[in-house]
Every structure is written in structure tokens, then in C-alpha cells.
Amino acid sequence: MTTVPETVLPRPFTLNDINVGTKLYAVLVRHAATQPGQSIFYGDLLDQARTMFDDDEVKRAVPIGIGMKLLFVQKFCDENAYPNLACLAVNKSKGKPGEGFPGDWLQQMREVAEFDWSAAQPVLDAYATRSIKAATPLKRRKEQPARELLFAHFREHRDAYKDFDNDDKEEMVSLLMEGFDVEVALRAVLDAKAALA
């Protein structure tokens, strides 16, 4: 199996990252079994997760915010010496990972296709439980106060939002609901947009 560098996280995982990440994991395992060696676009991955799971956080998830959820999957794979299942998910505009992708993408895709994922689910469940306990405890907000906070910040900092689309705003709402400070949430979305550019 290919050795890849340790996954470095831009921030700690949130409960949302863990919840949505575990759902994306299930979709990626199914995709690896039914379409071995084939990538899947972020939007299609989220659509399939919405079909498989009746979960409000999954329904609210948008491609711009998928990075941390896939890092959750990648970190799980790293820590258990599994192939990098997250390598299957790619940006539609590029059709492959960005230049910063660690290791040989095609080799990792082959390894994912050849791996027997049947015994990994209980390992993921235990990993998710540990991750939930370790998640940075933030004071969560309900959706409406999160939207009001975003709107108030937008009114005072319109230039910061000039390139935002609806998905970017929805990712901001999700981060604000998790309890992040509005400036931290804004920086996370801007960083994600830059990474996808």
C-alpha cells in the first residue's frame, strides 16, 4: 500500500464534520464496490448521501464545505492503515484532486478498489465515537440565530462576501450553527473556496 504523509487538519473536527463524514464514508464504500477505480464528484457524493440518509445536516451540506468531512474520512483511513477512501471524491471542475493532493492519486484509487471494506464499519463507528468525545465543544446555535448573525456580519462587511454564492452562505450557516465565531466561519469558507479554485 502507498504511504502518504500524515493528514494535517486546518481546524479540529466539529460534530457536523463527523456526522456528515460518516455518511460520506458509507457512500464512498458503496461507490468503491459498485464503480471500482472511478472517482465521484462532490455534488454527486452529497446527492447520494441525501438519498441514503434522512439527516438534516446531510441535507444542508454543500460542496464548498465538503473538505473537512472528507478529511474526517481520510484521517480515519490514515489512522487505521486503510487506503485513502476520500481520494475518490473530486471537484467537478477539475475531475481530479488538486496539486496539493498527497501521494499518487491513481495508485490510491486502485488500492481503494482492491480493499475489502466489509470489516471496516465497526472500526469507523468506534473512531466516530472517539472523535465526538474529542470534538471541540462549542456553544451551538439554532438555525435562525445563525442566519441572523450571518446577515448582521454581511451588512457590516459586504466586501468580504462579494464572491459568495448560495452554497457559500449555507456553509457559513452550518459553521455558525456549530458554534464558530463569524470571523472563523468566514475564513473557513474563504479558505475552502481558494482550495477549490
Image (cartoon, rainbow, N blue to C red):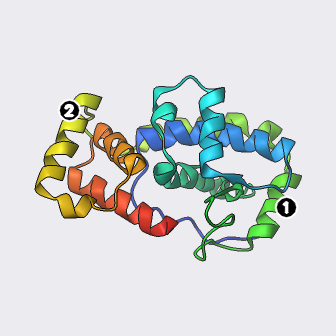
Query: In terms of image quadrants, where is residue 101?
Result: bottom right
**Quadrant where the image shows the N terminus:** bottom right
Compared with 112, 107 (above or below) is below
Q: How many marks?
A: 2
Q: Residue at x 69, y 37 (%)?
A: 26
**Image coordinates for residue 165, horizontal then vertical, percent:** 38, 52
Give amino acid for label 1. Answer: Arg
Compared with 29, 142 (above or below) is above
Q: Residue at x 67, y 70 (%)?
A: 4
**Image coordinates for residue 66, horizontal then vertical, percent:** 52, 50
**Image coordinates for residue 52, horizontal then vertical, percent:** 66, 28
Give amino acid for label 2. Answer: Pro
Q: Secondary structure at mark 1?
A: helix
Q: Secondary structure at mark 2?
A: helix
- Is label 2 or label 1 in front? 2
Of mark 2 and mark 1, the one earlier in the sequence is 1
Label of residue 110 in the image: 1
71 with respect to 41 (left or right): left
**Image coordinates for residue 192, horizontal then vertical, percent:** 43, 61
Residue that lies at the very extreme toward the top in this rendered image: 54
Q: Mark 2 — residue? A: 145
57 with respect to 157 (left or right): right
Q: Residue at x 40, y 53 (%)?
A: 12
Query: Is residue 178 visible to us here?
Result: yes
Q: CA distance from mark 2 to mark 1?
A: 45 Å
